[in-house]
Amino acid sequence: MFFNQLKFIESMLLKMKKTTIIFLGIVIGFLSVPQLKLQAQDTLVGKYGEDSTNCVMNNSLYYEFYRQWKQSKYKSPAWKDAIKPWRWVFLNCPKSTKNIYLHGEKLVEELIKNESDKAKKDKYIDTLMMVYAKRIEYFGNEGYVKGKWGSDLYKYRPEAYEEAYGLLKTSVELERNESEGSVLIYYFRSAEKMVKAEKLEASVLFDIYDQTSEIIEYNIRKYKAEGNEKLVTRWENVRNNIELSIEPYMDCPQIVSIYTPKFNDNPENVELLKKIAKLLDKNDCDVPLYREVVEKLHNLEPSAESAYLLGKMYIKLEDWATAAKYLEQAIQLYEDDNDKADARYLLANVYLQQKRYAEARSQCYEYLKVRPDEGKIYILIGDLYAMSANQCIDEELKVAYWPAVDMYIKAKNVDPSVEEQAKNKINTFSLYFPAKEQLFFRDLKPGDSYTVGCWINVTTTVRSSD
């Protein structure tokens, strides 16, 4: 019997590598020695099932064909030869290796892709779902696998959106910041179908948007810090996809109509207040509900975020003193430097309105320590200088326009997204440069180095308007 098995194996392995044949020979020889077989029986049965010889044989058979298929960049027909031995391993020794499931996903998806008969395709889809279920049963990693499971279920059976939603929801709750971008997209899409079928309230979409946005921003920050532009772009695409999906629902009247009753029913629910405040702020909804919610939130649980939102609210009301007070609080309370930078940018603009130019520039300098390549901050510093031109006059020359233009040039050089805005400002304020004649009478000429005094106190280059 054993020699018949060996003969069969040799005939099946004609196309395989010599190393694989040698390996199988050793394993089969090992299993054929009675004493050694008895010693290893318990271990082998646990991993390879009752028929360990056939398990090892079929594992090697399917893998060799799978490897050929993979080496051809999944273009050769070798996958067809892998299916039968893979299926045997999947059914008879499911604990033998996780590769059964990793490779099985691709093999079964290839079956689905190449099948035109609907009934057969449905059975293959069932098989793929079983692959995911068995992978969790034998090798765990529930959160990650349910993400793949739910995504493929939604992709191959859109009508099963409710089941897909449950799988994807579990996946995101377990994986959190480790969630795959595609999982977040399918999670939102399945939830949207649930809402349209009136199986969920529309507010769930805002909850999911808030949840997924935090995950997306975490990953964008992470890969920016690592300098991985490819993954930054990938996550930005995920963000764009979800924002396009939520856009039809991001209507201020609709948000207000959904959340006003919730707020009235539970006005001291801090988590609810945070959610409403974020949504209204993100959509720039200047409505009474926003002001009421933010003030209530800050009274119940003063935090960096509530102080920041109050600062933004008072900017809209043009109450600069109150806005400054809350933004200063936010900067003190925030722990994350990026959050501080956002608050500093707003505070610098508030100080500009208050003509507190030196303090505004200090906030800009702190911002640059975190984000040195953002042009908008250089434009703001340039505006501070330009607005000081009537104040910082030297021998009747409005010298502040020179460093202002320096900042606009810096802005367009570091950040192409503000290039047009910077050029317009350069053209505008260059008109206010003194004529060469004015420079001559002050013993100056274009190109000279010049230190602007006043609060600005920077060295720049002399320029003329002609």
Image: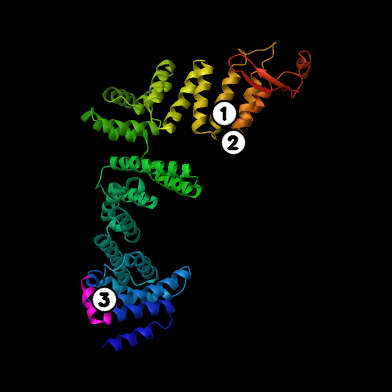
Mark 3 and mark 2 lie on one chain; the one further toward the N terminus is 3
Q: Is residue 49 visible?
A: no
Q: Amino acid at mark 3?
A: Ser
Q: Amino acid at mark 2?
A: Val
Graded by Cα atoms within 10 Å as few (under 14), some (14 to 19) or many (20 or more), the crowding at tag 1 reads: many
Q: Where's residue 161, x and y in %? A: 29, 55
Do the residues under discs 3 and 2 have CB atoms within 8 angstroms? no
Graded by Cα atoms within 10 Å as few (under 14), some (14 to 19) or many (20 or more), the crowding at tag 2 reads: some
Q: Give the spatial CA distance, label 3 vs label 2.
A: 64 Å
Q: Amino acid at mark 1?
A: Tyr
Q: Residue at x 67, y 23 (%)?
A: 460
Quadrant the N terminus occupies: bottom left
Mark 1 and mark 3 lie on one chain; the one further toward the N terminus is 3
Residue 294 quadrant: top left
Do the residues under discs 2 and 1 have CB atoms within 8 angstroms? yes
Residue 439 quadrant: top right
The residue labelled by disc 3 is 52
